[in-house]
Image (spheres, coloured by chain):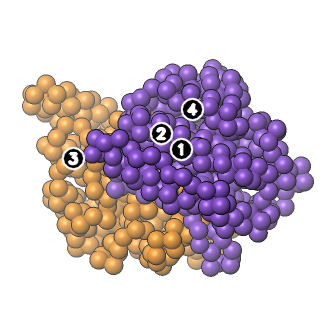
Chain colours: A orange, B purple
């Protein structure tokens, strides 16, 4: 069985996206948001069957850990109430996808984060999604300001109430930023990768996993720049008199395989222990085209992993076992 | 001959660093800065002979392209006058190192950038350093705010007056940020790498080199996250209907070899054309320890490049030829 740990509902029905625009306009105008539209099961089926499910079948992916579109989370937009409502309807929509295709999708929730709002205000939505909707994890945004990085580092104690809830519910978080408002950054071209690298370095500098030995964080996009600069991070740990990252971090931190060419995947598996790597593709996502060098989609990451010639046990870990360990609530819903 | 394109005067005499502290304190107190101290040739000799020159000899590096300490540029500190004076004394100090050891160092200047100050105010110092001090390049900070990214992207026309001067003087810039004031970021652990990735994506989105076909930019630290995610950047170019980065950028953009482990260097040379790679180590710099896995310094990057088994012509390009092409003013000063 092959589980993709990183999929977003990037093909959500137009009415959902249009409601978000209306919500935003209403907030800016000081009006109440319009009622959320009725979206039929058929519409949801169509958006998924023509894209994610079709590609999953083509690529031999059995199940996707599925969350609302990351770039659309837009935690910097509006206020706490705007984020709360948008998270709720986005998560409910993902829950409907999971209900329609329970063998193929497991839900991961967006949080109602908002700049300056304490993270414990996101615990209720996490709890609702896990306990009522059967979700298996969450996406945690280390920069709800949308590129201004006005929150404290993820290792700051202000985040701890949320980690306590995650541990209690036994769900991991994927550390995932959203859209960016600073024109220096491109969301999927630099902001996402920068956030991955930034958070890894925060974790290297602190003792978060000493305080939360059962906390699990997935750093997507192959860990940003980290595996390519693994020697730099090992050396910085040494310079800063911190324990080696392999020992101190890599039982709690996991990188996905959203690296869109063979040499990158080769490097990832060369330097990162196979126990810390989860199969992922972020399909349908940031990069949708076909690589002229291979004739296959850039984000068809299964091909790169298949080409590694992993031992059968290691292959099973990357494609399934590690995901079941990181997302234990998959156990009762998947496959 | 082996030329290291990336060295900073991280071992500058204590009096120089102390003056900077005094300058900063004076600015904050509204006083004039104290006079710059007298520093003897012997002091300068000692700081270099015991560190950079010793390590260069041990590693077989003949010449280093040498600039003021990057993390100490601190363009966000003080105002335009503070930055102007600090750039001047820092560049003069590097010029003295070059004068004392002209066979082993070539100068690269720090610019008097300051948040909100137009970049054309940095042209005079560039011109002074190139025409009077014999420098061969400059370090251009895409984020003089120190982590707030308040300037326009490097592809914005506001930067063009500086590029015009660079082209006229036939000098390249290394794109290099400095210290960071936001606690989310670690200067050498995330801010530097993020800046490298950020700027590459800016270049991919615009037509800077159509406007300046002779402009040359060195993106350090192995290009940040870019080579590891080369497929992502090729795919994003395709999605954004931009030309392929190899065609549109890599005649003007160069990555150094400041990647501190063998797998990273292997990947760099696997995906990036050898004509676009300059040997560099950033020694003595961000990572100073010995890798327990190899028994050698993390930043002894020559070992990784030597291990590649490059064809002799390619080896000569990476170690010397490309640097002479990117820094043509080395021709009259080096070796």
Secondary structure beneath dot 1 equals helix
Secondary structure under tag 2 reads helix
Q: Residue at x 40, y 47 (%)?
A: B34
How far separated are the C-alphas under marks 1 and 2?
6 Å
Q: CA distance from mark 4 to mark 1?
A: 11 Å
- Same chain under badges 2 and 3? The reply is no
Residue denoted by label 2:
B85
| Mark 2 → mark 4, Cα distance in angstroms | 10 Å
**Which residue is identified by label 3?**
A114
The residue at the point 37 percent across, 59 percent down is A174
* For the residues bearing labels 2 and 3, Cβ distance under 8 angstroms: no
- Residue plotted at (62% across, 22% down): B164
Disc 1 is attached to a residue of which chain?
Answer: B
Q: Are marks 2 and 4 on the same chain?
A: yes
Residue on which the image places disc 1: B89
Judged left or right of residue B98, residue B182 is left
When asked about the image quadrant of residue A132, the answer is: bottom left
User: Which residue carries the number 4 mark?
Assistant: B125
Q: Residue furthest right?
A: B312
Horizontal and vertical percent for residue A184? 44, 35
């Amino acid at each position: 069985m092959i589980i993709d740990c990183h999929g977003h509902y990037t093909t959500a029905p137009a009415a959902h996206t249009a409601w978000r625009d209306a919500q935003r306009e209403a907030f800016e105008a000081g009006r109440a948001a319009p009622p959320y539209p009725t979206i039929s099961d058929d519409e949801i089926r169509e958006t998924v069957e023509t894209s994610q499910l079709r590609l999953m079948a083509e690529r031999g992916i059995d199940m996707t850990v599925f969350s609302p579109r990351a770039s659309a989370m837009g935690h910097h937009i509006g206020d706490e109430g705007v984020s709360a409502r948008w998270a709720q309807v986005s998560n409910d929509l993902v829950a409907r996808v999971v209900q329609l295709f329970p063998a193929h999708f497991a839900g991961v929730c967006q949080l109602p984060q908002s700049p300056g709002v304490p993270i414990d205000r996101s615990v209720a939505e996490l709890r609702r999604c896990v306990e009522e909707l059967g979700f298996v994890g969450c996406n945690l945004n280390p920069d709800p300001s949308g590129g201004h990085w006005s929150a404290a580092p993820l290792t700051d104690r202000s985040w701890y109430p949320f980690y306590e809830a995650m541990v209690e519910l036994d769900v991991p978080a994927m550390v995932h930023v959203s859209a960016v408002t600073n024109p220096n950054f491109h969301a999927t071209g630099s902001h996402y990768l920068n956030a991955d690298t930034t958070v890894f370095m925060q974790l290297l500098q602190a003792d978060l996993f000493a305080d939360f030995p059962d906390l699990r964080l997935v750093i997507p996009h192959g860990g940003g720049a980290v595996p390519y600069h693994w020697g730099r991070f090992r050396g910085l740990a040494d310079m800063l008199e911190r324990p080696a990252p392999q020992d101190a971090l890599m039982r709690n931190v996991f990188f996905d395989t959203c690296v869109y060419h063979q040499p990158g995947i080769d490097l990832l598996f060369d330097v990162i222990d196979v126990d810390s790597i989860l199969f992922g593709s972020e399909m349908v996502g940031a990069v949708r085209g076909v690589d002229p060098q291979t004739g296959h989609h850039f984000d068809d990451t299964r091909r790169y992993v298949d080409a590694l010639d992993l031992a059968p046990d290691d292959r099973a870990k990357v494609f399934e076992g590690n995901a079941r360990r990181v997302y234990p609530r998959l156990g009762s819903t998947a496959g």
